[in-house]
């Protein structure tokens, strides 16, 4: 089964335009983002040293990126010493080839998967399917997405765009195709739906011989990998199969065991707004008689070293994929995750995807404009990624061209003037600043990021802003405005 | 060139603009955050653990060492459990009062066999009060990771105050990264359907934590 593909996506403004007209989607998104947002603020307020944890997280990640070569080599040594095998993949194709080869070597034709952004990014499920291997997503939301032949729309709750009625219909219709059917008379209560998923997936867990995972963190010093989750499907995939293959981006390293004390405090609170997520698993190579006896780690680059080469943009590699920035983003809330045309939606997607993939395509050229620059994403980011700064930087790159690194080599991008990218960016700028509703919110949101506001928009926006006054930036800080208007409710029509 | 060398070379080129800085890791940045939050007595820390466990819907019970076997027997009876999987190193006294079939943690038991067992009883490695977390490290009294995963009912015994720490940093300090660790904060839960919290989907849906003193 295929999870759908992002290739050939329309540019952000077009996709966003459709999403904004989809009432169900907007209702679901609004409910979800507002709920998580409020809970997160409480979870963060509970720890008095949040600012210090955030600063430490930022510095640990920056230090790691600055010495990434050294830590990668150290990680390889420690994973190998602990009984694992390390593979290196320069791009998505190579990663897919390696994983396919490793699965085939076990003689198996199905794998169970833990939710993983990295495997979505490289299109692993599709690559395996093409080789006759079924990859079963086991996270409840990913199961909903996969059975619905759909794409994930949120990092943390990938099926956020579906309501319970839709989920019931998908389960009733599709489960029998892939294994144990949904029970007769399945209703749409979350408890019954979760039970149906439990029964359906348990059959697969109990017979699975190969598990595929990502990882939230890798510890260079010890060779330990960490997966943070809620449901226990991660534990199932990491524990029951004979072979475990973990596919992880090279930026997920932290130097030392002790560093986890920072991220295991900031990640759950930023992500699910919990003091701690229900389950965290750590494993170091293989352990005699406990869990998989064969462990492969596939380290992927796939645009990360190109991102690292960008002095402003490299901070995006600090991201721990908590999704807090999605939940506060007024553009994401209206446009939904699919509009970003990438596995990484929302503010982080708007800066990460164009860096990983380059800004040549229409969608990638338009992504840096998929924002109101309100700065809320920066405020909540647990590793202090200055997303607005990177957005402005990438806008300039799109319109003015300049030197970028692609596939390890420096190339000079031409300015996008007069090209498709310009028109895409132009439309996106108009969408972000000019969409009914988004305009009103955008104007108000902009106040605390005034330092990012050029007098005219760079590039294609320049042409636009030269003939129109840019929205003036009021002095009221974003947070005050947010409080006063209950998160933009008044301006969302 | 191998992909390994290719990637490492790309990394080095990518950071060539960064001024050289050989400050060793342990001096490279400040850990300005706290080692623990708040100022609590030992009893208060144990109370906080109980509170936070319960807040995430674990069922918390307290007893002293003499009452442990009775407590475990009662919990199993209330659940209607007739079979219990036990780690090889579990103190046999703990189950002395329970009328159940014991299924020892065996290397050759299949996941399907574990799926037919009603409950699992284990000890733990450490418990973290601020987050309501218990950590298992696969020690002899905790068993292989799968035995606390497949059965639907997990009874976990925490020795208080000896195994209780305040915070995540203090917890990590006590743990050995070479062992496979499972951190558990409340039972398995999902919020994937319209953000309604549902216990389940995959791990044990009922987690009972027994805080035993005087061991
Ligand atoms: S950019 Fe920051 S807030 Fe957004 S997902 Fe990454 S770590 Fe979280």
Image (spheres, rainbow, N blue to C red):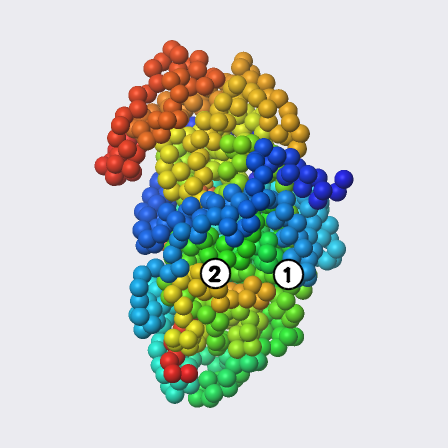
Number of other residues with Cα within 10 Å of mark 2, as a class: few under 14, some 14 to 19, many 20 or more: many
Image x and y of residue A119, in percent: 60, 46
Rendered image quadrant of residue B145: bottom right
User: Left or right of B36: which side holds A248?
Assistant: right
The residue lying at 61 percent from left, 34 percent from top is B16
In the image, farthest residue toward the top: A467
The residue lying at 43 percent from left, 36 percent from top is A386
User: Left or right of A78: which side holds B160?
Assistant: left
Quadrant where the N terminus of chain B sits is top right
Ligand 1 picture quarter: top left
In the image, farthest residue toward the right: B1
Rendered image quadrant of residue A300: top right
B7 vs A457: above or below: below
**Residues indicated by labels 1 and 2 sit on the same polypeptide chain:** yes
The residue lying at 37 percent from left, 26 percent from top is A451
Image x and y of residue B156, in percent: 45, 74
* Residue ID for mark 2: A279
Mark 1 vs 2: CB contact within 8 A: no
Q: Who is closer to the viewer here, A254 or B202?
A: A254
Image x and y of residue A194, in percent: 45, 58
Image x and y of residue A305, in percent: 61, 37
């Amino acid at each position: 089964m295929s999870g759908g593909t992002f290739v050939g996506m329309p540019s952000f403004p077009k996709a966003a335009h459709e999403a904004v007209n989809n009432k169900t989607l907007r209702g679901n998104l609004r409910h979800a983002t507002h709920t998580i947002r409020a809970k997160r603020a409480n979870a963060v307020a509970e720890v008095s040293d949040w600012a210090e944890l955030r600063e430490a997280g930022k510095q640990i990640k920056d230090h790691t990126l600055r010495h990434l070569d050294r830590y990668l080599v150290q990680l390889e040594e420690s994973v190998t010493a602990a009984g694992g095998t390390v593979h290196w993949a320069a791009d998505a194709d190579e990663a897919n080839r390696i994983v396919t080869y490793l699965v085939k070597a076990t003689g198996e034709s199905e794998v169970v998967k833990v939710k993983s952004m990295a495997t979505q990014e490289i299109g692993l499920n599709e690559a395996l399917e093409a080789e006759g291997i079924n990859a079963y997503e086991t996270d409840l939301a990913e199961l909903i997405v996969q059975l619905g032949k759909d794409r994930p729309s949120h990092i943390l709750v990938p099926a956020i765009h579906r309501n319970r009625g839709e989920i019931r219909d998908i389960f009733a219709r599709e489960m029998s195709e892939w294994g144990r059917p949904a029970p007769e008379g399945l209703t749409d209560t979350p408890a019954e739906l979760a039970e149906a998923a439990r029964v359906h997936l348990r059959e697969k867990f109990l017979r699975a011989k190969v598990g595929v995972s990502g990882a939230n963190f890798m510890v260079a010093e010890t060779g330990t990998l960490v997966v943070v989750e809620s449901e226990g499907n991660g534990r199932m995939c990491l524990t029951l199969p004979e072979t475990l293959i973990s596919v992880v981006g090279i930026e997920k390293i932290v130097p030392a065991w002790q560093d986890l004390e920072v991220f295991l405090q900031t990640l759950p609170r930023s992500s699910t707004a919990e003091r701690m997520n229900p389950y965290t698993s750590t494993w170091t190579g293989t352990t005699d008689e406990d869990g998989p006896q064969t462990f492969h780690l596939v380290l992927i680059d796939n645009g990360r070293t190109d991102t690292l080469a960008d002095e402003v943009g490299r901070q995006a590699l600090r991201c721990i994929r908590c999704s807090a920035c999605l939940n506060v983003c007024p553009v994401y809330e209206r446009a939904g995750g699919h509009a970003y045309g990438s596995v990484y939606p929302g503010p982080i997607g708007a800066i990460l995807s164009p860096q990983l993939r380059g800004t040549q395509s229409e969608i990638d050229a338009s992504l840096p404009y998929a924002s109101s620059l309100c700065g809320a994403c920066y405020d909540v980011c647990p590793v202090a990624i200055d997303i607005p700064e990177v957005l402005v930087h990438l806008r300039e790159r799109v319109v003015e061209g300049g030197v970028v690194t692609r596939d390890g080599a420096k190339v000079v991008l031409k300015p996008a003037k007069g090209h498709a990218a310009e028109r895409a960016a132009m439309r996106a700028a108009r969408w972000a600043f000019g969409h009914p509703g988004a305009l009103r919110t955008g104007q108000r949101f902009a106040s605390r990021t005034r330092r990012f506001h050029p007098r005219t928009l760079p590039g294609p926006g320049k042409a636009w802003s030269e003939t129109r006054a840019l929205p003036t930036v009021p002095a009221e800080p974003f947070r005050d405005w947010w409080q006063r208007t209950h998160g933009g409710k008044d301006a969302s029509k | 060139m191998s992909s390994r060398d290719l990637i490492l070379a790309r990394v080095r080129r990518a950071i060539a603009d960064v001024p050289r800085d050989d400050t060793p890791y342990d001096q490279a940045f400040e850990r300005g955050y706290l080692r623990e939050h708040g100022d609590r007595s030992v009893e208060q820390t144990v109370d906080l653990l109980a509170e936070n466990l319960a807040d995430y819907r674990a069922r918390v019970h307290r007893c002293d060492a003499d009452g442990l076997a009775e407590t475990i027997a009662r919990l199993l009876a209330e659940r209607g459990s007739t079979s219990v999987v036990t780690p090889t190193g579990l103190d046999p006294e703990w189950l002395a009062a329970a009328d159940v079939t014991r299924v020892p943690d065996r290397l050759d038991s299949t996941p399907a066999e574990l799926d037919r067992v009603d409950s699992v009883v284990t000890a733990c490695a450490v418990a973290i009060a601020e987050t309501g977390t218990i950590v298992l490290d696969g020690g002899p009294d905790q068993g292989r990771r799968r035995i606390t995963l497949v059965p639907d009912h997990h009874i976990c015994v925490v020795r208080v105050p000896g195994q209780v720490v305040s915070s995540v940093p203090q917890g990590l300090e006590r743990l050995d990264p070479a062992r496979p660790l499972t951190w558990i904060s409340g039972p398995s839960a999902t919020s994937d359907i319209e953000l309604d919290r549902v216990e389940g989907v995959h791990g044990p849906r009922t987690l009972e934590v027994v805080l035993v003193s005087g061991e």
